[in-house]
Amino acid sequence: MAAGTRALLLVAAAASCCSLLVAANPPAATVADVCKGTAFPALCTATAGKQAERYHNVVDPLTVLEMQVDAFAKRTEGARAHVAEAAQTASPAARAKLDLCNNLYLDVLDNLGACRRAIGFKDAVTIRATMGMAAQDMQNCDEQFRQIGENNPMKRFDESLVEMSENCRSLSNMI
């Protein structure tokens, strides 16, 4: 067999093998693909997707959960900053409730720390428990304002944080 023909056969065989390898390895999941399995997929995609580059574009349920916890922490810090702003114009009763909400947000940050440790161990039960406690903290903040009959200036934050906690619980079921 001529050297040129042999080289052509080797190239054809290599191309054939490579096409089989590509077909055997489906394309990697995207954040949106993983988030489809959560309670609030649009929120999951919007918040976790911003974190993807920090995780070197590795996308699996565990990594998306880590992204979501990072976003949750940032949102909680944003809520704490808003407490300080809202307290400046709040009634004395509302100011006391805002102080309590701020303490609840600190509890949420503690729970997120526990959640991060649980992620390291792939401990889905602890992740769900910490997210349940975080959601309860948001609901407790809302309840404080219902008790005094005033609008909660933290309502928008609390709602999105509860939704983020639900997404984290959904993601923990995937690991």
Image (cartoon, helix red, strand yellow):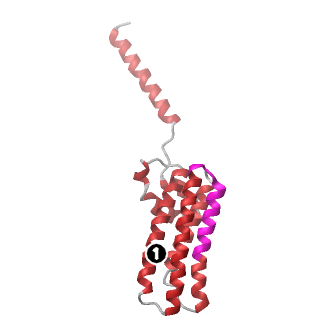
Spot the residue most to the right: 125
Which residue is most to the top? 1
Residue type, mark 1 in image: Arg
**Which quadrant would the N terminus be assigned to in this image?**
top left
Q: Nearer the viewer, residue 172 or 92?
A: 92
Residue 168 location in percent, x, y? 57, 61
Q: Does the stretch in magenta take in 63?
A: no
The image quarter containing residue 78 is bottom left
Q: Nearer the viewer, residue 158 or 7?
A: 158
Q: Quadrant of residue 138?
A: bottom right
Q: Residue at x 57, y 59 (%)?
A: 114
Residue 55: x and y, percent? 44, 50
Q: Residue at x 35, y 7 (%)?
A: 2
Label 1 crowd bin: few (<14), some (14–19), many (20+), radius 10 Å: many
Residue at horizontal 59 percent and vertical 85 percent from the top: 144
Q: Is residue 101 above or below residue 129?
A: below
Q: Which residues are magenta?
A: 120-138
**Side of 37 relative to 29 (left or right):** right
Q: Residue furthest left?
A: 4
Q: Which residue is mark 1?
A: 80
Q: 69 and 175: which one is in front?
A: 69
Does residue 134 show up magenta in the picture? yes
Q: Residue 83 at x, y = what percent?
A: 46, 80
Q: Is residue 105 above or below residue 56?
A: below
Residue located 45% across and 26% down the image: 16
- The percent position of residue 39, horizontal first and vertical second, equals 59, 64
Query: What kind of secondary structure does the magenta stretch mostly adopt?
Result: helix
Classify mark 1: helix, strand or loop: helix
